[in-house]
Amino acid sequence: MHSRRNIYWITILILILSLISMGSISAQKHRDRWKFEDYFPENYFYPEEDTRKNDKVGEMIFYMRLADIAPLKNIIPQKGETILRLNFFPEFAHPLFVEVRQVDNQSIQLTWKKGKAIRGYVEHATFTALTDTGWVDETERKYYGNDWKKGVCDVGSRSLTLSEWQQMSEILEEIDFLNYPHCINCSESELPYMLEYKKGRKSVSYYTECPNEKKENRLVKLLVSLVDTTYVDMSIYSSGKDVVAPAYPGGKDECEDFLRNAIQYPASAIRDLKEYDARVCFIVEKNGTIGMVVKDSYSGKDGYGFVDELIRVVKTMPKWEPATKNGEKVRCHKTLCYNYVLPKEIRPQYGHPILDTERDTSCWKAIETCYRDLLCDSFNAENNLSMGLNYYQEYLLENKSTEPPTYFDSLIYEGHWEYYFDRTPVVSHPGDSALKYFYKVMDLNPKVDMLTRIYMPVLQLEQQLHRGHNPLVELPFDTVEGVHLPYSYLIDWLKNGQLDAAKDYYGAAEDSYYWVGFYSNMMTGMKEPVIYNDSLQEDEAIFRFSIFPSFHASVAFRVTKSKKSMMLHWKILRRNYDPLKNAFFYTFKKEGHKRISSAKYECLLQYIENVHLDELPRINHVIMCDGAEWVIERKTNKGFKAHLTNQPGDDIKQLYRFLVKLTDKKLSYINEY
């Protein structure tokens, strides 16, 4: 009896769970009712290639899906039924979807929807990733400052009179809509829309950005006038050719005064000492009033309400002088910027600028930005590093020679070196300040890679300022697992142990870190061992000769000498590209090893002697488009030496040719680099 009762309740429970599951599946299907590709056949609008994925048509489909507009091709008309539909997308307004259905001139029904998602000013639209919501999902937020709400804000329907339908029919017959092209595209998009028409088995969808006033535009104006007369004149212009921009009464200075007096600086931003450059887009109507105002697509993240406050103030502006085109007043798009700058009384001060140049402004702004971040989090190693680097650049400038700027100088100062010829630091004692923040970075014990970057600058500053050496600087460079060279190895030291006060050792450390990472990744891909920290006996040695060409397989030759024998190992790594992941990956092409005779080993030593490895710098690299990186390593019981270059001499190339002969492999492309 008990077992039957248990079976009964278990069956009821299974039925309930099934109903819940079916409901959730149904809800999921409703949420994702239409897929992006359901709306139009592949290559429907662009026969050469399906660019609708990243064009305005893709944007329109996105809005249609948000408002749950069914694909026309999925609608099966009744016998004798005609369906006419307009998908209307004016800027700074709700999308409008209008549909007319007619059956045998008896029943003519007009329905409409207004989408919730407001379509703001669209510039350089890019639809990059196919997702459940179409070709735009998270990506489009970078391009639009819109409200991506699903659903509709207004719906309605009514019957059309026979005369109203007759007007539409006459236009359709006159323009021969069933034989229209699918798409007319142009560069100057004023008011794009899409017309769809289905009669019996025949259907056509037509998209345009430059409508013909005497043809399809007549039909569009008729349709929207039957729903909402405010949609009839929705063209928005941008100032430029033939359009005179709208103007604030009194001019630009008056506009700035209005904003400055009306805007209330967000209290939370003052508390956190935050500044912001806010941008909004809005419409100046024909009568000069302010229309819809939205966040500009190029505004960054705003967690303090900067943009919201600017939108509030712009909406309260007095009437503007409207834009004109060929002497007639028109609606025009306008972008307005406002820089939120902290009041002087609460801005952080560090001293007094020595000069009053653009360089002063740039330097102080960078320092103040770091300083405000440090007020919020003084234990952030990256903030302290940024602050130290600002002062370090000033220190370098103070000790800079009068020689013309180098390539790296132009990188540091963003190509504006002419502002820095005075050789006078903006801040007092920049070396002391830089060292102070670098010490803070070391106290916080951040990642090893950050510490290795400031190792040389700290030694440089301590030496220049006659400071004692900070014991925290002693880092275990040689114990980083999987790294085939010490991180700081490719920084060239002066032979006398002194550091050049004018040399940017942080930049050199960045380069060293990059090349060590590059080399270590390649060696790891080849499953090559780390040799610079090996312990060897007096009669043992390890040599490694690597080449990484731009367009051919990478190769590593490793020669080991022990008491018993001399061995040659070689590995060839193929470089492959995965277009789906947009990334390179490596696979072994060939590998092998062989014993070499004493005579060939001695011959190899002679080639190495000709290279003069001990006299070569650790790195000799010049900027070029393509080429190859050559790396020579030697490890004995007396020490380690490596040389990385992309401009090898004939002596190095002869050495590599000899190794190729030893392997009997066809690697003739080495001669091309």
Image (spheres, rainbow, N blue to C red):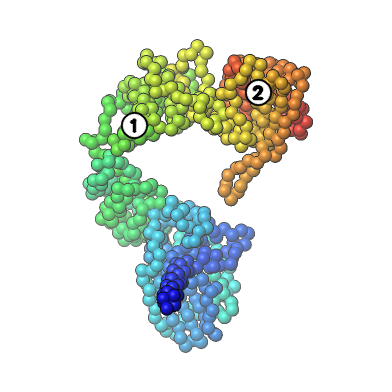
Which three-letter amino acid code belongs to the residue tagged 1?
A: Ile
Residue sitting at x 71%, y 27%: 568
Residue at 36% across, 53% down: 295
Left or right relative to 236: residue 248: left
Q: How far from the left and from the top, in percent, is residue 550?
A: 64, 36
Quarter in which the N terminus is drawn: bottom left
Relative to 81, is 288 above or below? above
Say above or below: 272 vs 453.
below
Q: Is residue 172 visible?
A: no
- Note whether 219 is above or below 591 in the view shown: below
Q: Which residue is mark 2?
A: 543
Residue at coordinates 36% horizontally, 68% vertically from top-left?
A: 153
The crowding category of the residue bearing disc 1, from other C-alpha atoms within 10 Å (few below 14, some 14 to 19, many at least 20), is many
Left or right for 597, reference 624 = right
Q: Quadrant of residue 361?
A: top left
Mark 1 or mark 2, which has the lower sequence index? 1
In this figure, which residue is indicated by the disc labeled 1? Answer: 367
Q: Residues within 10 Å of mark 2 (few under 14, many from 20)?
A: many
Residue in front for this viewpoint, 526 or 463 = 526
**Residues at circles 1 and 2 in contact by the CB criterion of under 8 Å:** no
Visible residue check, residue 442: yes
**Which mark, by number, is residue 4?**
none
Instruction: Identify residue type, mark 2.
Output: Phe
